[in-house]
Image: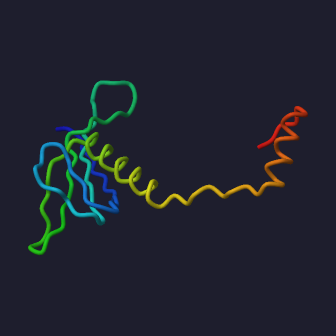
């Protein structure tokens, strides 16, 4: 009999996303992710092997549970965050002429400027 453990986490998507293996586009929002692991027996240290990653997709009729590849979930999260960073990132502040001149002078004199 193998020993198993289950962990839960919540992920948030700011916009729609897709996962390889599913034709549908999932709406942005909060999603519960469940990871099932089993103990690897016969090794001299405590180690677990992932056996399943499940995405709980909310719907008006309850929730659907979909088996997913955790790497695909990570990819979708990174893509969602990249898109958010591009949209939400403020423009860098503009330097006024006097500050730019002072920085240029300092750099030409060998002073480190950060």
Say above or below: 13 vs 23: below
The residue positioned farthest toward the top in the image shown:
43
Residue 65, horizontal then vertical, whole percent? 14, 57
x and y, in percent, of residue 44 in the image: 38, 25
- Residue at 84 percent across and 55 percent down: it is 98
Q: Is residue 18 above or below residue 60?
A: above
Q: Is residue 84 left or right of residue 59?
A: right
Pick the front one: 52 or 56: 56
Question: Could you say where residue 17 lies in the image, as x and y percent from the top left?
Answer: 25, 55
Taking 78 as reference, is 23 left or right? left
Q: Quadrant of the C terminus?
A: top right
The residue positioned 62% from the left and 55% from the top of the image is 92
Name the one closer to the observer, 36 or 112. Answer: 112
- Residue plotted at (13% across, 43% down): 21
- The residue lying at 15 percent from left, 48 percent from top is 67
Spot the residue most to the front. 97
Q: Position of residue 57 (x, y in %)?
A: 18, 62
Q: Is residue 80 above or below residue 63?
A: above
Say above or below: 74 vs 110: below
Name the residue at the bottom extreme: 60
Q: Coloured how?
A: rainbow
Question: Which residue is more in the foreground, 16 or 87?
Answer: 87
Counting every numbered tag in the picture gives: 0
Q: Quadrant of residue 10?
A: bottom left
Q: Is residue 72 left or right of residue 84?
A: left
Task: Name the image quarter holding the N terminus.
Answer: top left
């Amino acid at each position: 009999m193998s020993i198993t453990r289950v962990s839960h986490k919540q992920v948030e998507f700011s916009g729609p996303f897709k996962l390889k293996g599913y034709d549908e586009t999932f709406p942005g929002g909060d999603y519960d992710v469940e990871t099932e692991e089993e103990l690897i027996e016969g090794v001299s240290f405590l180690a677990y092997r992932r056996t399943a990653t499940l995405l709980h997709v909310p719907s008006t009729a309850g929730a659907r549970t979909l088996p997913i590849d955790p790497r695909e979930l990570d990819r979708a999260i990174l893509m969602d965050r990249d898109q958010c960073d591009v949209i939400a990132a403020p423009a860098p502040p503009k330097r006024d002429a006097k500050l730019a001149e002072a920085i240029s002078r300092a750099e030409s004199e060998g002073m480190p400027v950060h």
